[in-house]
Image (tube, rainbow, N blue to C red):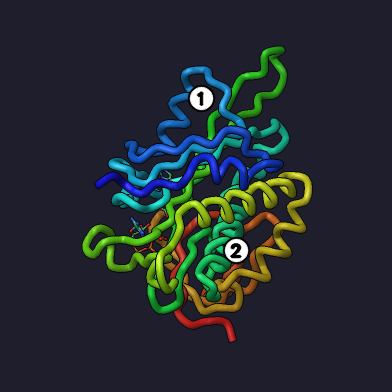
Amino acid sequence: MGIDVPDQHTLATALTGTRWTRIEVVAETGSTNADLLGRIDAGETVDGTVLISAKQTSGRGRHARVWETPAGQLAVSAAVRVRPDAIVHLGWLSLLTGLAVHDAVSEVAGTALELKWPNDVLAPGRGKLAGILSEFRLIAAPDGGPAGGVAVIGTGLNIDLPAGTAPNTAASIGDLVDGALDQTTVAAAYLRGLSERLDAWPDRIAELAETYREVSATLGSRVRLLLPGDVEVIGDAVDIDDEGRIVVDGPEGRITASAGDVTHLRPAT
Ligand SMILES: Nc1ncnc2c1ncn2[C@@H]1O[C@H](COP(=O)(O)OP(=O)(O)OP(=O)(O)O)[C@@H](O)[C@H]1O
Ligand SMILES: O=C(O)CCCC[C@@H]1SC[C@@H]2NC(=O)N[C@@H]21
């Protein structure tokens, strides 16, 4: 039996009018992020391209971790041109993508999900439904001016994970939905939302930050924040600022961090 894959034609029709002008669907690859980055490195123009695979054999997670993608899931990579003056705002790409995933999966699953800073989408009490890895390539300006580049925004969405194929902290969208779950519907909802969120980037970041704060389950929660360098801070997440950084009131005082791993210890009240 073949691997279930999203329907390319239906997706292309559903995404008409968005920034995604080329939709490519494959049953299996190593890593959709690695594929698009390789094409950029080979000189291909991939802006506006989306590559979707239902299975990955070398899926990449954040911090060089492995992202398990057994057959029937969604691995989606989308290529976005980055202006020279937007490079400073690259960190926002994975946050706004988190918003798009959160909204699409909540809509498809028909239930409220949690967005954990910076970009994990969680089913409360069940686990992680999706992960995001945004990678970037600089491209030299032909006239010697400031360089811009291309970002590859990679998202792994667990549609229906067979037992034992991913860490036991993983959850699937299929766990939350009665009956069959259509990969094409999930992919279309996510990519439409991502295109819309990207319209606000990088010129209307304050607007993105406002929306992010409304959706964030981290804001107001008691958290354990593991900073790069293995420094752990336990405290209250009191803000996500306009730079997308988390602000935590801990025992040593207030700290602001642009990277790190968060665990929710107690929900916002
Ligand atoms: N398909 C998958 N679904 C969910 N998690 C996965 C999957 N494949 C690999 N993982 C990874 O397994 C690890 C699970 O560890 P854990 O649940 O402790 O998450 P974590 O420490 O909160 O990490 P992270 O912040 O990266 O999610 C995470 O790094 C997660 O990204
Ligand atoms: O939470 C994480 O650690 C990020 C996981 C990102 C996985 C996606 S699946 C599509 C794209 N291709 C990859 O190899 N990784 C990303």
Q: Position of residue 83 (x, y in %)?
A: 70, 32
Tell which circle, 1 or 2, labels the residue nearer the N-terminal end.
1
Image-quarter location of ligand 1: bottom left
**Which of the numbered marks, if any, corresponds to residue 40?**
1
- Which of discs 1 and 2 lies nearer the camera? The answer is 2
Q: Position of residue 105 (x, y in %)?
A: 52, 63
Q: Residues within 10 Å of mark 1 (few under 14, many from 20)?
A: many
Inspect the image, locate mark 2, and give the three-letter code of the amino acid beneath it: Asp
Q: Nearer the viewer, residue 35 or 175?
A: 175
Q: Can residue 174 be seen?
A: yes
**Which of the numbered marks, if any, corresponds to residue 15?**
none
Q: Position of residue 89 (x, y in %)?
A: 66, 44
Disc 1 and disc 2: Cα gap in Å?
Answer: 29 Å
Picture layout, residue 165 above or below residue 113: above
Q: Nearer the viewer, residue 152 or 55?
A: 55
Q: Position of residue 175 (x, y in %)?
A: 38, 71
Inspect the image, locate mark 1, and give the three-letter code of the amino acid beneath it: Ile
Secondary structure beneath label 2: helix
Does the numbered disc 1 mark a residue whose Cβ is under 8 Å from ligand 2? no
Residue indicated by mark 2: 103
